[in-house]
Image (cartoon, rainbow, N blue to C red):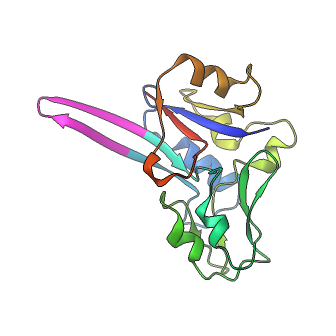
Amino acid sequence: MRYAMAVDTKKCVGCSDCVVACQLENNVPIGYCRDWIVESTAGTYPELELEFRSERCNHCANAPCVRCCPTGASHIVEGGVVLVDPDACIGCGACIASCPYDARYTHPDGYVDKCTFCIHRVRKGQKPACVEVCPTKCLYFGDLDDPNSEVSIMLKTRDYKTLIPEAGTDPQLYFLT
């Protein structure tokens, strides 16, 4: 089992419903976020392309945040989901510094926090909160080892990219192009 998410950049409108759903579902403090919207412009005027991306932790198979954590607070659980144990985290920030995706923050209570792919929901057979609320249905989640999962089907039938592939992290967050 390898959980992954794909974001359809042709359908995302940058509404931030995913961000709000995550904040509510996970009791994220005001002023912080586990996911966010990026607006990217490419090209030269008048031929510009605008892309919206819902970004979050990439749940890397080769996660530098896990390798550098001195206490083991950052760890990988079944399905390849990268988690942080707040009780074991000392808030040193090594994982924040090592993440090429800027996907972690220090929670006001002193531990590092990040997207969990809503593993508490997934274990109950539910979708992550962001996927559940997306009005344009641009977020796909599932098991890459299941050829019939939404995410597997999208990655087989569409072109996609990952962010910063040269980092060698083997991210499990894909952007459909």
Look at 35% across and 44% down and name the residue there: 39
Q: In screen coordinates, is 110 left or right of 105?
A: right
Residue 64 seen in the figure: yes
Label tally: 0
Q: In screen coordinates, is 97 left or right of 85?
A: left
Is 63 rendered above or below residue 135? below
Look at 57% across and 76% down and name the residue there: 94
Quarter occupied by the N terminus: top right
Q: In screen coordinates, is 17 left or right of 89?
A: left
Quarter occupied by the C terminus: top left
Look at 69% across and 83% down and name the residue there: 90
Is 61 rendered above or below residue 4? below
In the image, the segment drawn in magenta is: 39-52
Residue 56 coordinates in the image, percent (x, y): 55, 51
Residue 138 coordinates in the image, percent (x, y): 54, 29
Q: Please identify the residue farthest to the top as the structure is shown.
A: 157
Asked where in the image residue 132 lies, by quadrant, the reply is: top right
Residue 43 part of the magenta-drawn span: yes
Q: In screen coordinates, is 25 left or right of 5?
A: right
Is 17 rendered above or below residue 138? below
Q: Please identify the residue farthest to the right as the structure is shown.
A: 124
Residue 14 coordinates in the image, percent (x, y): 43, 39
